[in-house]
Image (cartoon, helix red, strand yellow):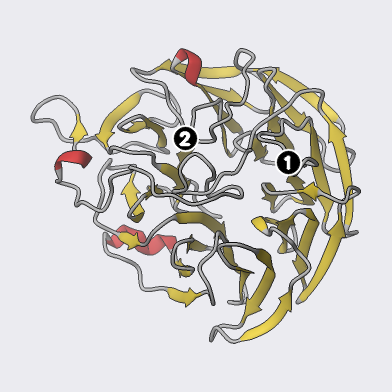
Amino acid sequence: MNKPIRNRALTGTALALAASAVLTACGGEDAASPDTQAKNAPGTKAVAVKDPLVATFDGGLYVLDGESLKPARTIELPGFNRLNPAGDDSHVIVSTDAGFRVLNAAEQTFPGIEYKGAKPGHVVLHAGRTVLFTDGTGEVNAFDPDDLDSGKKPQGRTYTSAEPHHGVAIELSNGHLLTTLGTEEKRTGALVLDKNNKEIKRNEDCPGVHGEAAAKGEAVGIGCEDGLLIFKDGKFTKVDAPDAYGRIGNQRGSDASPILLGDYKTDPEAELERPTRISLINTETAKLRLVDLGTSYSFRSLGRGPHGEALVLGTNGTLHVIDPETGTVEKKIPVVDKWQEPLDWQQARPTLFVRDHTAYVSEPGKRKLHAVDIESGKKVASVTLPQSTNELSGVVAGH
């Protein structure tokens, strides 16, 4: 089963459903501790990296130059670690078994900013706010990512869910907080809180709620096992899947498009379903379109281009550039060799990370990373690293 829930051994991640168990990731130490030492030539000081990328490997992190892909530094960090942009041009969020840790990727250091708690899950960027959801405690932390430059933990907003669960939260431009409802056994929907964390809206018509994405006009989609739940202009609208079980667990949105990109699965009993169809959900009309790509993909395959293009990295090694309005595959860009999604969600597979006009794609089987210009379809840079990478992310400013 593809069940990505952070810190749930072999059965889940921050990106999909899962069962629990503690991973062996080792976090929580300060930047000078032995397991987080940055490796470089003896006596050298890290040189600031512009638009850094960060990739995980078994035992640490690679920090790379965002243009050349040249490795800038290797940081030791044992265990299985996850990555997300922090929301500015310098930092990323590293999820370990002890909680969220902020990495200054530009300077390749951990400044000591942590949000401790078991099973750190989703990290959401929207409207100039960064929101963390800790599954093991149900705690939500929201802050302005620009405040990370101080090197100190930002003063932000906190909220604790009624019960811990694998959830997600997003703060809207008006200060309202949309967050999921559920328990460790069952997730049912979402609620909206005002600036004082007082509940003002609720919808429990979203079984297995998982993941979120925001579209043009600040329409927020929440994935369900039978479609998608949209929150827009203060109201919830349910978009039903064409199948009794039609799970949309991973979504990607764009400020340039009212249409959300989602995965689509129809077999609740599958150990690992390898879907070939993706979903396109129009948040203006509440209509859902399915598009068959003729190739499968994984939960790390979805992205959005600078003009709202829907991007999907297929197991055929091709990056599909899709017009979200029509569902037409407008371009197929060969990037990596053919691959197959592993049964264990924690195992490496080609991963897509998109920033501006560039799609970054990992190729673990060859220890490579590639940078592709989305509009020209040309591969503009590649690098071979000492070890195979797993997760791939980087700084993203101005969200």
Other-residue count near label 2 (Cα within 10 Å), few / some / many at <14 / 14–19 / ≥20:
many
How many numbered discs, if any?
2
Label 1: state its secondary structure. Answer: loop
Considering the image in quadrants, where does the N terminus appear?
A: top right
Name of the residue lying farthest toward the left: 43
Q: SS at mark 2?
A: loop
Given residues 106 and 291, the one toward you in this image is 291
Left or right placement of residue 120 versus residue 328 in this view? left
Of pointers 2 and 1, the one earlier in the residue sequence: 1
Q: Is residue 32 left or right of residue 339?
A: left
Report x, y in % for residue 281.
82, 51
| Relative to 91, 179 lies left or right | right
Considering depth in this image, is 266 or 146 the residue closer to the camera?
266
- Position in image of residue 342 (x %, y %): 57, 26
Which label sits on residue 391?
2
Measured Cα–Cα span from mark 2 to mark 1? 27 Å
392 to the left or right of 181 = left
Q: Residue at x 88, y 59 (%)?
A: 286
Within-10-Å neighbours for mark 1: few <14, some 14–19, many 20+: few
Name which residue lies at 28% across and 49% down: 27
- The amino acid type found where label 2 is placed reads Glu
Residue carrying label 1: 269
In the image, what residue occupies the spot 56% across and 30% down? 351
Q: Quadrant of residue 216?
A: bottom right
Q: Name the spot of residue 8 as percent of width and height, x first.
A: 47, 48
Q: Amino acid at mark 1?
A: Glu
Give the number of the disc on residue 215: none
Residue 58, quarter of picture: top left
Task: Give above or below for 54 relative to 250.
Answer: above
